[in-house]
Amino acid sequence: MSPFQKCALVIGLGLFATAGGAMAEGASCPEVLKHSFNRLQDETPQDLCQYAGKVVLVVNTASYCGFTSQYEGLEKLYAKYQSKGLVVLGFPTNDFGKQEPGNDKQIAEFCFNTYGVKFPMFSKSSVKGKDINPLYAQLIKTSGTTPKWNFYKYLIDRNGKVVDSYTSVTTPEDKSLVADIEKALAQ
């Protein structure tokens, strides 16, 4: 059996990663994470269920925005809290002010070379309008709020519940955001 077939079998049996990173039978994937997106760097499909049991901060990003420097703070958050169960998921979009005109390769190179981004990033997609990606459609429906600009954030707890959303002016260092992340990690 190939590694790919083994992986498909594991997923098919309902074995998902837990908060500690171990595989546990019967662990369920919250509805909000039941999506797959291509990884930014190489367009390999990624099942978001791999983040089941983690605290997830979802952020729509852009390379040419006044808030682009938030990449640095997001990477610091990820580095500081990753071992405790936080994952930051970046979704580049050209929806606001056409501030993400590049292709996936250009975006990936910019994020890594300029800000050292190592948190998971996904292929450029729409986070509003008729071509909205399904995760954002669900986040909007669940939270009752839409992204107003680049670097809008949604925090999801370990059980898949949307805890809150944060405007673009809320920096990754913001005390209330950090407190909400720490509270979610402690649960």
Image (cartoon, rainbow, N blue to C red):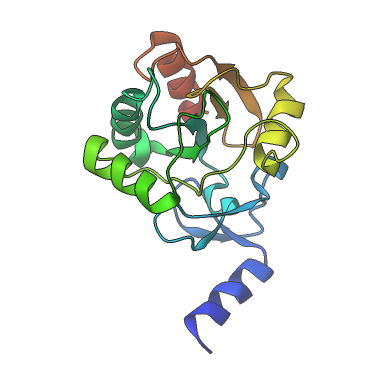
- In the displayed structure image, the side of residue 79 where residue 43 appears, left or right: right
Percent coordinates x, y for residue 123 in the rendering: 50, 49
Quarter residue 77 falls in: top left
**Image: 47 above or below 177:** below
Q: How many marks?
A: 0
Percent coordinates x, y for residue 104 in the rendering: 43, 50
Q: What residue is at 34 percent from the left and 41 percent from the top? A: 83
- In the displayed structure image, the side of residue 69 where residue 183 appears, left or right: right
Of residues 25 and 67, the one nearer the viewer is 67
Quarter residue 81 falls in: top left
Quarter residue 135 falls in: top right
Q: What residue is at 57 percent from the left and 47 percent from the top? A: 52
Percent coordinates x, y for residue 156 in the rendering: 58, 31
Percent coordinates x, y for residue 178 in the rendering: 41, 18
Of residues 105 and 101, the one nearer the viewer is 101
**Image: 148 above or below 2:** above
Q: What residue is at 36 percent from the left and 29 percent from the top? A: 74
Q: What residue is at 23 percent from the left and 36 percent from the top? A: 114
**Image: 151 above or below 2:** above
